[in-house]
Image: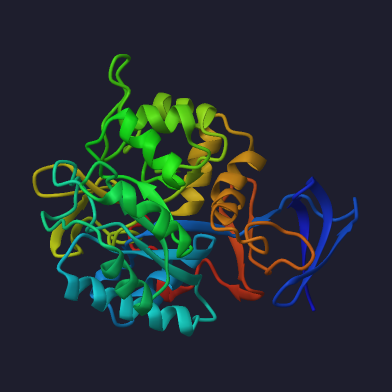
Amino acid sequence: MNLIEGRILTPDGWLTGRLRFDTHVRAIEADAGVRTDRLVLPGFIDLHVHGAAGVDIMQGGGAATTVARAHARHGTTLLLGTTMTAHASDIERALHGLRGAIAAKAADGARVLGAHLEGPFISPHRLGAQPPLTVPATLEAVQRLHAIAPLRVLTLAPEMPGHLALIPALAALGIRVQIGHSNGSYEDGAAALAAGASGFTHLFNGMTGLHHREPGITGAALAHAEYAELIPDLEHVAPGALRAALRAIPRAYAITDATAATGMPDGEYALGPQRVYKCAGCVRLAGGSLAGSALTMDQALRNLVELGEDLALASQRCARFPADYLDLADRGRLAPGAWADAVVLDEALRPRQVFSEGHAIDPDDDAFRDKDRR
């Protein structure tokens, strides 16, 4: 039996004491006498991850395992490997790689739970950093991909022909349908939610914006959403817009949209079939537009706190809310019976220990030490 001491964030609030665990949390014991300079939070959950450590999920093979190990050093204990718009054969290769990582979790990595299929069922008018290889969605195509690796989340543009009618069937498969990379209207967004869509992919980015006479997809999210992804790197979304979303959407949660450039020095990297460039902490296409990020979840937490979020609520946005979004009652919280996924932070909110399903992970492991740290 292992134990951690400190200020522990439980579902009922902060408790000073000890967390006892093996693969699962076995007990949480109050003890006002233990040291309180360590904060014990649920491990972070990232539902939108393209890469890290110089590798991209679309490479297939062992890329997903490398990505999971790199993000675990920053407190992420569960993630979804995220694909790009690409030719069907390339998406299938990525999903076969994810299938291997799902079946055989690396002890020193985050749990790869499944895939987030971000393309190719998106609008050609709102590609963002996606290549122009979009296709209409069909149930048969989704089922074929779902059979390779479980699609936990699927992004689509609801205004595309046939997509709105497809949403109930996708939801029935257990897939969370997200509205994103969409050129649709407010009405399209509201109709998609009514049909069974449950979230929004990187809110504000890759969708029609909010105007007081044309509220767009963004307006539909702010008016109606319970859940939505946000990239809190302070580059993709301005602080004021982040605050508006955090106030309007009760269970908005953080993602990284991390690319192969995460944890790496400035330079050129892959994002699917495209080349992207990391400079000054941002990742961009050659033309200058943002193309994913170099964000990690511990930095996302710190940025949310910097914006004025209470630490407990910021933690929920990085763990509890994405777990609840996927109906994972035993993840994203520190409670008896839950998986022993935890991150121990110092007073500067930097990881000092990480535990993934009870296995200790060293944030300072030389094999995955961030190469962009000065």
Of 165 and 145, the residue lying toward us: 165
Residue 54 seen by the camera: no
Image quadrant in which the N terminus is located: bottom right
Q: Position of residue 64 (x, y in %)?
A: 37, 74
Of 83 and 124, the residue lying toward us: 124
- Left or right side of 122 for 326: right
Residue 272 seen by the camera: yes
Q: Residue at x 24, y 61 (%)?
A: 84
Q: Residue at x 30, y 61 (%)?
A: 264
Of 229 and 274, the residue lying toward us: 229
Number of numbered labels in the structure image? 0
Check the image and tell me how it is coloured. Answer: rainbow
**Of all residues shown, which one is farthest toward the top?**
213
Q: Is residue 196 above or below residue 67?
A: above
Q: Position of residue 81 (x, y in %)?
A: 38, 66
Image quadrant in which the C terminus is located: bottom left
Of 310 and 59, the residue lying toward us: 59
Q: Quadrant of residue 209?
A: top left
- Left or right side of 8 for 328: left
Q: Is residue 193 above or below residue 95?
A: above
Q: Position of residue 237 (x, y in %)?
A: 35, 34
- Left or right side of 255 for 212: left
Q: Residue at x 42, y 45 (%)?
A: 195
Q: Quadrant of residue 331?
A: bottom right
Q: Position of residue 217 (x, y in %)?
A: 32, 33
